[in-house]
């Protein structure tokens, strides 16, 4: 029960952070990095750029992770270039939220870096 409460809290807080970042009329580098991190995680993308005015996301999606070797320089990774259109950035990013344990750890790290406070892992 405690674990599901923490899971729900993390998901609610990341959704609130996304809403806050999209509602802000001034696009800061910090919010843009948040958007890019969420898209990279969800799409397994190597390179992401967001054109907020044209409402486009360009990214290179890694198709096969088995070709990646961290011990050597990777000159070739099979990627797919995608150019996606979004109507509402808030809805688009909220659809990228995954609910598995690995993703929750990633979101907790994002929350920690954006709110500058630790997320309590124990229930009070």
Image: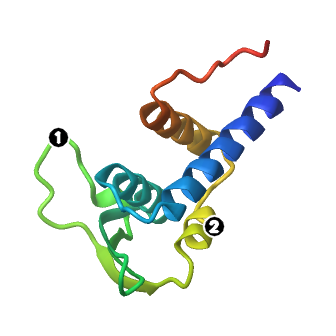
* Residue 82 percent coordinates (x, y): 37, 82
Q: What residue sits 40% from the left and 54% below the top?
A: 31
Identify the residue shown where x is 63% and y is 50%: 16
Residue 85, disc: none
- Nearer to us of marks 1 and 2 is 2
In the rendered image, the vertical position of residue 40 relative to residue 51, given as above or below: above
Q: Secondary structure at mark 1?
A: loop
Element under disc 2: loop
Position above or below: 13 against 91:
above
Asked where in the image residue 56 lies, by quadrant, the reply is bottom left
> Left of 4 or right of it: where is 92?
left
Q: Which residue is the site of mark 2? A: 95
Q: Quadrant of the C terminus?
A: top right
- The residues tagged by marks 1 and 2 sit, at their Cα atoms, a distance apart of 34 Å
Taking 52 as reference, is 83 above or below it? below
Residue, x 57% and y 45% (percent of image)? 103
Residue 11's image quarter?
Answer: top right
Q: Where is mark 1, residue-wise? A: 71
């Amino acid at each position: 029960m405690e674990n599901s409460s923490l899971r729900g809290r993390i998901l609610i807080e990341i959704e609130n952070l996304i809403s806050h970042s999209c509602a802000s009329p001034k696009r800061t580098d910090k919010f843009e990095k948040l958007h890019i991190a969420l898209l990279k995680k969800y799409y397994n993308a190597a390179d992401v750029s967001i054109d907020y005015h044209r409402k486009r996301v360009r990214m290179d999606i890694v198709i096969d992770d088995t070709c990646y070797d961290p011990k050597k320089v990777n000159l070739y990774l099979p990627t797919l270039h995608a150019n996606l259109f979004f109507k509402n950035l808030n809805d688009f990013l909220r659809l990228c939220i995954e609910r598995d344990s690995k993703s929750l750890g990633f979101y907790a790290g994002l929350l920690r870096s954006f709110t500058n406070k630790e997320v309590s892992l124990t229930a009070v």
